[in-house]
């Protein structure tokens, strides 16, 4: 299985992640707050793809 790429663009109050799937298509994943709840939701989204490479 080819891993997806999870990219994150961090900012002071938000972090945005996008996912590039196995076919090279960009899948917008969302914008998350930098508080504990936002971080937990962002991690949950990334874990939906067990075969992944992460980039910041």
Image (cartoon, grey):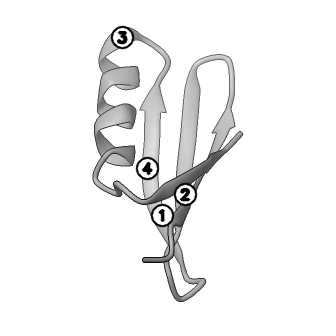
Residue position for label 4: 30
Quarter that holds the C terminus: top right
State if disc 1 and disc 4 touch (CB < 8 Å). Answer: yes
- The mark lying in front, picked from 2 and 4, is 2
Residue sitting at the far bottom: 23
Q: Label 2 crowding class (10 Å Cα cut-off): few <14, some 14-19, many 20+?
A: some
Q: In this view, does 33 lie to the left or right of 40?
A: right
State if disc 3 and disc 2 touch (CB < 8 Å). Answer: no
Residue position for label 3: 36
Q: Which numbered disc covers residue 46?
A: none
- Residue 51 at what x, y percent from top left? 42, 60
> What whole-number distance in Å separates the C-alpha atoms at marks 1 and 2?
5 Å
Residue position for label 2: 18
> What whole-number distance in Å separates the C-alpha atoms at marks 4 and 1?
6 Å
> What whole-number distance in Å separates the C-alpha atoms at marks 3 and 4?
16 Å
Q: Label 4 crowding class (10 Å Cα cut-off): few <14, some 14-19, many 20+?
A: some
Mark earlier in primary sequence (2, 3) = 2
> What whole-number distance in Å separates the C-alpha atoms at marks 2 and 3?
20 Å
- Residue 12 at what x, y percent from top left? 67, 17
State if disc 2 and disc 1 touch (CB < 8 Å). Answer: yes
Quarter that holds the N terminus: bottom left
Q: What element carries label 4?
A: strand
Residue sitting at the far front: 1
Mark earlier in primary sequence (3, 4) = 4
Q: Which residue is drawn at 56% across and 42% down?
A: 16
Mark earlier in primary sequence (2, 4) = 2
């Amino acid at each position: 299985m080819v891993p997806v790429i999870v990219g994150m663009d961090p900012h002071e109050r938000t972090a945005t992640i996008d996912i590039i799937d196995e076919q090279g298509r960009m899948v917008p994943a969302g914008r998350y707050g930098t508080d504990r709840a936002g971080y937990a939701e962002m991690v949950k989204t990334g874990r939906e793809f067990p075969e992944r490479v992460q980039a910041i």
